[in-house]
Image (cartoon, helix red, strand yellow):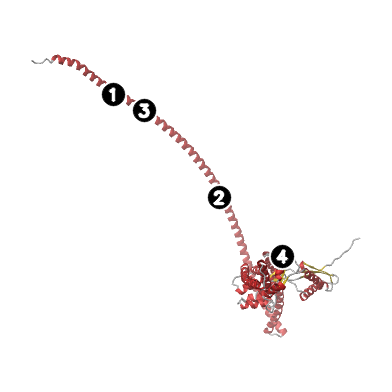
């Protein structure tokens, strides 16, 4: 039996067919919707693109307008600047044109002036040519006249040409000798005046440029004693300590009633210094007896000898003098304890070295050699109490043995005028020595000797005939003399000044120099009634 599938197919077709139709319609609707949506989106995108394009067109138009405005403004600025520069250039060109025009006018004027001068020079040249020709003619005429006169003179004087020439030369020689003598006298006078002025300038420059402290050393050595009991210990039992001390040191020890002081006296300054230092050490040590005294004095003497070399080296360094022998350094150190009229000789030698250099530099000489001459000029004073003779000769002999230069030896031996100078450094040392010795505060003397010297100066001056009054001034460096104008004329006044100066040189001893000034005054007084 076959199954009946028709009702089942009808049933299935009745159910599936509407579903299929619905599916087909849904798909068609979906496709239509998608197409519609795509068209809508495309339309929206087209609209947005149109909007963007229009916005771009508007923005581009604004940018173009702004750029055009800025370009126009920039163009206006550049055009204004160009016009301004053009105007300035026109002004400069006008000024340049004016200057060129002015220069052209000046050139034309100069050309006219040169043409005028050229014509004037041509005229002068023509006149000079005429004058030269006239001079030649006159010269020929004069030569003829001179020859005629010469022949006439020879006929009149009966002299040959050679004799006349000799006579003429003799006359010319006499005239030239007189003129030469006058010229020489004039040159010598001018040279003396110039030299005196130059000397004053150099000396004043040296004094102004060198300013040293005023130094005056005492020649008396004293030692402080802590108590009177120590004085007794210095003297010792029955004076044995003081006798041993004086014998060892070679000095005199004065112990008097002066509280707290013992005086050491000796002619030799080195011995006196050794004694002073030794006594101070003995007092500090407290052990005072003959054996200890000899030990201390020997040690002190050796230490002082070393110190003298150091002092000499320091002095040479201060004076900037190198290459000195050890013996010279030792002698310079000894000058530290040597005085002259209260002035320390070592300090004086250093001052003289500086002054010599200053004056040598002013005169164009060797300042180094001048310093050496000045530092060593008084080196003989270190041993003048041990060797016979004056300190210039002693110092020169010592330095000669040490192979010093001839200029230095001559300066040492001749700075007081004992020998003739062979170089300009000798008078330089003499001048510097006088400046250092005579400066205020450089040297000193006792009140009694000072007053005595002033009185002696005034006595010598008033002893001259015609002198009314005399006054010693400037610490005895100058004496001013007032003469009677009725009894003394100008010539006699000059003679009185010379006589007073000679008398002072012969009768007195003094450092430096003394200036003598004679004053002669003439007064005429009348009364109107």
Percent from the top left, x then y, of residue 112? 60, 57
Quick one: SS at disc 3? helix
Name the foreground residue: 399 vs 133.
Answer: 399
| Pointer 4 residue | 227
Q: CA distance from mark 3 to mark 2?
A: 70 Å
Of label 1 and label 2, which has the lower sequence position?
1
| Pointer 1 residue | 34
Of label 4 and label 1, which has the lower sequence position?
1
Of label 4 and label 3, which has the lower sequence position?
3
| Pointer 3 residue | 48
Q: CA distance from mark 2 to mark 4?
A: 105 Å
Of label 2 and label 4, which has the lower sequence position?
2
Q: Which mark is residue 96?
A: 2
Q: CA distance from mark 3 to mark 1?
A: 21 Å
Q: CA distance from mark 1 to mark 2?
A: 89 Å
**Quadrant that contains the C terminus:** bottom right
Which is in the foreground here, disc 4 or disc 1?
Answer: 4
Of label 3 and label 1, which has the lower sequence position?
1
Name the foreground residue: 312 vs 120.
Answer: 312
Query: Callout 4: 10 Å neighbours few (<14), some, many (20+)?
Result: few
**Residue under the point 51% across and 40% down:** 80
Quick one: SS at disc 4? loop
Percent from the top left, x then y, of residue 95? 57, 48
Query: Callout 3: 10 Å neighbours few (<14), some, many (20+)?
Result: few
Query: Callout 2: 10 Å neighbours few (<14), some, many (20+)?
Result: few
Name the foreground residue: 407 vs 24.
Answer: 407
**Quadrant that contains the N terminus:** top left
Q: Is residue 100 above or below residue 130?
A: above
Percent from the top left, x then y, of residue 387? 67, 78
Residue 283 visible: yes
Q: CA distance from mark 4 to mark 3?
A: 129 Å
Which is in the foreground here, disc 2 or disc 4?
Answer: 4
């Amino acid at each position: 039996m076959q199954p009946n599938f028709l009702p089942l197919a009808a049933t299935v077709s009745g159910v599936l067919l509407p579903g299929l139709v619905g599916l087909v319609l849904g798909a068609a609707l979906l496709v239509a919707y998608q197409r519609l949506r795509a068209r809508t989106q495309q339309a929206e995108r087209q609209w947005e693109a149109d909007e963007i394009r229009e916005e771009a067109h508007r923005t581009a138009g604004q940018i173009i307008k702004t750029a055009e405005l800025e370009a126009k403004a920039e163009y206006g600025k550049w055009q204004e600047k160009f016009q301004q520069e053009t105007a300035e250039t026109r002004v400069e060109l006008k000024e340049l044109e004016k200057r060129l025009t002015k220069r052209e006018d000046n050139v034309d004027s100069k050309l006219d002036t040169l043409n005028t001068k050229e014509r004037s020079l041509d005229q002068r040249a023509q006149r000079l040519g005429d004058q030269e020709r006239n001079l030649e003619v006159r010269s020929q005429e004069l030569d003829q006249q001179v020859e005629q006169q010469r022949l006439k003179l020879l006929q009149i004087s009966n002299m040959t040409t050679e004799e006349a020439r000799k006579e003429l030369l003799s006359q010319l020689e006499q005239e030239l000798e007189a003129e030469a003598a006058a010229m020489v006298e004039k040159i010598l006078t001018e040279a003396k005046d110039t030299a005196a002025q130059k000397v004053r300038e150099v000396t004043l420059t040296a004094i102004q440029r060198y300013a040293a402290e005023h130094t005056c050393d005492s020649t008396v050595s004293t030692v402080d004693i802590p108590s009177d009991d120590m004085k007794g210990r210095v003297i010792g039992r029955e004076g044995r300590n003081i006798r041993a001390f004086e014998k060892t040191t070679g000095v005199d020890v004065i112990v008097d009633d002066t509280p707290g002081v013992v005086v050491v006296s000796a002619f030799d300054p080195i011995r006196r210094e050794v004694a002073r230092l030794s006594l101070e050490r003995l007092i500090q040590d407290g052990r005072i007896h003959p054996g200890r005294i000899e030990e201390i004095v020997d040690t002190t003497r050796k230490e002082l000898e070393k110190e003298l070399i150091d002092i000499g080296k320091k002095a040479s360094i201060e004076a900037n003098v190198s290459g000195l022998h050890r013996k010279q350094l030792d002698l310079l150190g000894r000058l530290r304890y040597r005085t002259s009229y209260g002035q320390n000789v070592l300090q004086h030698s250093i001052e003289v070295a500086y002054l010599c250099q200053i004056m040598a530099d002013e005169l164009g000489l060797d300042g180094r050699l001048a310093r050496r001459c000045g530092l060593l000029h008084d080196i003989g004073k270190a041993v003048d109490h041990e060797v016979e003779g004056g300190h210039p000769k002693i110092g020169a002999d010592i330095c000669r043995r040490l192979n010093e230069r001839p200029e230095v030896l001559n300066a040492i031996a001749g700075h007081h005028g004992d020998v003739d100078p062979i170089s300009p450094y000798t008078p330089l040392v003499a001048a510097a020595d006088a400046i250092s010795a005579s400066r205020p505060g450089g040297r000193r003397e006792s009140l009694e000797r000072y007053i005595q010297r002033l009185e002696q100066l005034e006595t010598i001056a008033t002893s001259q005939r015609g002198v009314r009054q005399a006054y010693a001034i400037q610490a005895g460096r100058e004496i001013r003399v007032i003469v009677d104008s009725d009894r003394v004329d100008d010539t006699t006044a000059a003679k009185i000044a010379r006589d007073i100066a000679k008398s002072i040189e012969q009768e007195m001893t003094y450092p430096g120099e003394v200036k003598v000034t004679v004053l002669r005054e003439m007064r005429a007084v009348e009364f109107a009634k």
